[in-house]
Amino acid sequence: MEFRIENVSIVWSENSIAKFLDILASKQPTPGGGGASALVGAVAAALGSMMANLTLGKPKFAAVEKEVMLLEGELQVARAEFLKLVDEDAKAYNGVMECYHLPKNGPQEQLLRRERLAKAAQFAALVPLRIAEHCVKAAALTERVAQIGNPALLTDAACSVILAGAALECAEQNVLINLPLTHNESFNDDCRAKLKEYKEAVQKSKAKTIGVR
């Protein structure tokens, strides 16, 4: 993740969560709710990895070693993708804001501004929609780790899927806020349908993971 604050480039993978939270709490418009939801998704994936890593190498779980290793690898990929989406969300927000500064002095300029804003809004909706999609993936992977992994980590697995659900709900809000600006009902209906599908999927993973106990 990278943000430019006062001409200083910040790479979040090389900095502390405290610094991220300081900027999140500041007057800076980004990172905001979308970036925060992506970060929470990354935490969810990390907890899934934790359970996997504390399963690997134990003789008791030798029969599922290969599968758990694959699951942990996929959770690593999900975690990295969440962090990239923090940046993507900031870029998407900035794109929408730039459109509001376009001139609107006559019909032609107003039309161009409306078209560019609609395009920017679609992108700004698609980024948190991807965050939501990765929440589904992280929850499903953790669900499977919980089913076959070290039962001593079931509380952490439960926290993982709960956080994935919370991240998805936050991402959903960041999708919905942009839809009125797209002026594209087909696109909007598709986004809403996907959100419904993703929420149902995470709820199922949550129920199954917590139900392993």
Image (tube, rainbow, N blue to C red):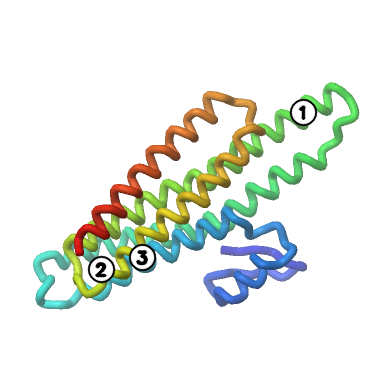
Q: Which numbered tag is attached to residue 154?
A: 2
Decide which of tag 3 and tag 2 comes sooner along the chain: 2
Image coordinates of residue 7 in percent, x first then y, are 76, 67
Decide which of tag 1 and tag 3 comes sooner along the chain: 1
In percent of the image, x 40 and y 56: which residue is there? Answer: 164
In percent of the image, x 63 and y 31: which residue is there? Answer: 182
- The quadrant in which the C terminus is found is bottom left
In percent of the image, x 75 and y 40: which residue is there? Answer: 99
Q: Amino acid at mark 2?
A: Leu
In percent of the image, x 36 and y 65: which residue is there? Answer: 159
Image coordinates of residue 199 in percent, x first then y, are 39, 44
Estimate the spatial distance between the alpha carbons at disc 3 and disc 2, rounded to whole Å.
9 Å
Q: Which numbered tag is attached to residue 112?
A: 1
Q: How many marks?
A: 3
Q: Which numbered tag is attached to residue 172?
A: none
Q: Amino acid at mark 1?
A: Leu
Q: Where is residue 74, by image quadrant?
A: bottom left
Number of residues whose C-alpha sits closer than 10 Å to that of mark 2, classed few (under 14), some (14–19) or many (20 or more)? many
Q: Secondary structure at mark 2?
A: helix
Taking the image as shown, residue 39 lies to the left or right of residue 209, namely: right
Looking at the image, residue 194 lies above or below residue 36: above
Estimate the spatial distance between the alpha carbons at disc 1 and disc 2, rounded to whole Å.
53 Å
Q: Secondary structure at mark 1?
A: helix
Disc 3: which residue: 159
Taking the image as shown, residue 212 lies to the left or right of residue 159, namely: left
Mark nearest the camera among 1 and 3 is 3
